[in-house]
Image (cartoon, rainbow, N blue to C red):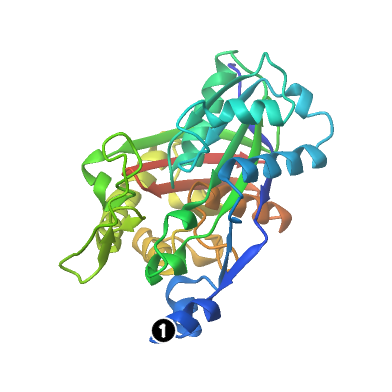
Amino acid sequence: MGKKAYIKAIEYYLPENILTNEQITEKFPEWSAEKVTNKVGISERHLAGIDETAVDMAHQAAEKLFSMNTGLREKVDFLLLCSQSVDYKLPSSSCILQNSLGLKTSCGAFDINLGCSGYEYGLAVAKGLIISNIATNVLVITSETYTKYIHPDDKGNQTIFGDAATASIISTDGFAEIGEFVLGTDGSGAETLIVKTGGARYPDKTGAYTINENGDTQWDDNLYMDGGAIFNFTADVVPLMVEQILKKENMELDNIDLWVFHQANKYMINYLRKLIRIDKDKFYVYMENVGNTVSSTIPIALCEAQKEGLLRGNVLLAGFGVGLSWGATVLRCK
């Protein structure tokens, strides 16, 4: 029998600053705090400090993990950082983290530029490193400061996104064996969730904006999300992805003991749950006090589900979003 890969430990970090629905509706009185909570399922979200970066948060999440798991720091031989809000164009932020965390210099490290499906991709790469004998203990970090990309007048995205970082150790033993994967990409939808300026294509901020056919404002220099297009994408892709991963695992819907989807927003994931016909009691939701933290939503949910004693049997993870990109796997939990 070949080598296997497991999740050995997970922890997460939330920045101190909190933005409540009441604070948002003070600025946008046409909405009520209750209406926001009912629609998106989020009451508050954490915001990175002015001088706090995704790399700072990644460091905090990893240090929390090491403090709870004595001796793991010295065993890490590969570091993967999933983030779309890194400190510099170069060098790789994973290299900065290797040094700040005091990891050995024989540790491999690179960045993964992915959003909502990033944790599944990180698990896939980590599993590949382990079963190919390249690494034994892989530190997978997700960290995002999307709120720094949001325009102050963009009330929609302000209600949804929060900042957070997570740290997981993927190893040759642990509490959850990592199964097969289904991964996918459709770059034709790249502009449905985008920050247009700041990269090589459009390096300079323009200050420009347009009003689209739905009456939504699209700023060049800030996060833009076409909610309708993203919703249609998930409705098309996620049920098929679930079908494909179950087929790979020779499982049926009833064989899954817990479902952990990317915590996009309450309306979207409830729609998907009903569309796929998932039992509500098996569908884990954890977003009310953290918001949509992009690549960190699934590991945060796993961490909380573990505390509640819910990680047992077969747990299906499904991420989907910016890219457009998607990924799923099944964990076999002890």
Looking at the picture, does residue 215 appear above or below residue 276?
A: below
Residue appearing at x 53%, y 53% in the figure: 297
Residue 210 in view (yes/no): yes
Determine the residue located farthest toward the right in the rendered image: 70
Give neighbour class at mark 1: few <14, some 14-19, many 20+ (Cα, 10 Å).
some
Where in the figure is residue 158, as x and y percent of width and height?
A: 45, 67
In the rendered image, which quarter contains the N terminus?
top right
Q: Quadrant of residue 89 in the image?
A: top left
Q: Could you tell me how many numbered marks the image carries?
A: 1
Residue 79 at what x, y percent from top left? 61, 27
Q: Is residue 100 left or right of residue 215?
A: right
Q: Is residue 144 left or right of residue 65?
A: left
Instruction: Determine the residue positioned at 61% across, 29% down.
Output: 96
For the point 55% across and 34% down, the residue is: 81
**Quadrant of the frame with the C terminus:** top right
Q: Hey, what amino acid is under mark 1?
A: Trp
At mark 1, the secondary structure is: loop
Task: Tell me where residue 144 appears, x and y as whole percent.
Answer: 52, 47
Q: Residue 265, relative to residue 148: is it above or below?
A: below
Residue bearing mark 1? 31
Q: Position of residue 71 (x, y in %)?
A: 83, 29
